[in-house]
Amino acid sequence: MTDDKDVLRDVWFGRIPTCFTLYQDEITEREAEPYYLLLPRVSYLTLVTDKVKKHFQKVMRQEDISEIWFEYEGTPLKWHYPIGLLFDLLASSSALPWNITVHFKSFPEKDLLHCPSKDVIEAHFMSCVKEADALKHKSQVINEMQKKDHKQLWMGLQNDRFDQFWAINRKLMEYPAEENGFRYIPFRIYQTTTERPFIQKLFRPVSTDGQLHTLGDLLKEVCPSAVAPEVPNTVLPVEAKIKPTFEPSRIAGGRKASLAVKRWASQGPSHVFIARKKFHWFRTKLKQQVFRAGV
């Protein structure tokens, strides 16, 4: 995987056109215009929305501002889920841009964890990295790294620096040539159900008879309901989106790669045309926004 530089870059630079709108019951001194942003799939909402926060705070009184949180169609968005995972779970079938509502009061204590600073996000991220390396290398790689390596890995994610991140992350993706892969593949399959939001279990990359396992093998074992019955000469209508800690690659970052598994149907060329048209509309909105800000 560390040699697939073009694929890794495409995954890293995946973006979701997003429109942020202030909740209608928030008290403002003047009308709050929407804020448009291209969100990186591999990052976290609370890590990349400082501009959104500042934009809406300009039209609000200081006494009406508390901890910011986001929701989509009534569902609070968990900040510790990567952005791409949130979108795939909740809005992948909706039209773009992704419409997210911004709140500054009535924090949903039962649904969300508080995120008072970026240090909390860093602690969560590094915890996931260490957990994944325990499965892959018995924690040997992460324990041999220096503190500055951990910091570089985090700063690469925080500042959206691909080369800075992968200079360290590649070490977490290597294994001895005499071995066929990691001890276990760190993964999570996320579901929309609240009873069991995700599935995870030990899964080896190689079968007992020496055959390399595929993603299909993993799904059949841990989530058979996501795989359609095999029919000769047909393509299974299953799409697995790997959780951005670096989608295909964040099995990569040492992060637990999370699979948001869903069924899908092929869409024709007309949808491609519509998507391009919407993208050009969104890009125009971004330019207008920058112009108004005087940037």
Image (cartoon, grey):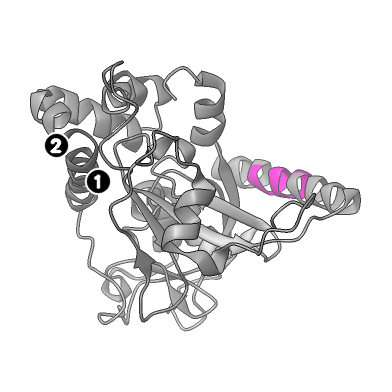
Quarter of the image with the N terminus is top left
Identify whether 290 is placed above or below 167: below
The quarter holding residue 2 reads top left
Q: Which mark is residue 138?
A: 2
Q: Residues within 10 Å of mark 1 (few under 14, many from 20)?
A: many
Pinpoint residue 129: horizontal percent, then vertical percent: 23, 41
At mark 2, the secondary structure is loop
Front residue of 122 and 286: 122
**CB within 8 Å, label 2 to label 1:** no
Q: Is residue 252 left or right of residue 148?
A: right
Q: Residues within 10 Å of mark 2 (few under 14, many from 20)?
A: some
Residue 265 seen in render = yes
Identify whether 82 is placed above or below 64: above
For marks 2 and 1, give the CA distance: 18 Å
Front residue of 150 and 192: 192
Q: Is residue 282 left or right of residue 258?
A: right
Front residue of 243 and 285: 243
Furthest residue toward right:
270
Majority SS type along the magenta span: helix
Pinpoint residue 220: horizontal percent, then vertical percent: 50, 58
At mark 1, the secondary structure is helix
> Which residue lies at the image location 37% right of the left edge and 66% below the top edge?
198
Mark closer to the chain start, 2 or 1: 1
Q: Which residues are magenta?
A: 280-286
> Which residue lies at the image location 58% right of the left edge and 49% below the top edge?
16
**Residue topped by disc 1:** 125
Q: Is 281 colored magenta in this rendering?
A: yes
Quarter of the image with the C terminus is top right
Pinpoint residue 72: horizontal percent, then vertical percent: 51, 72
Front residue of 125 and 294: 125
Q: Is residue 38 left or right of residue 136?
A: right
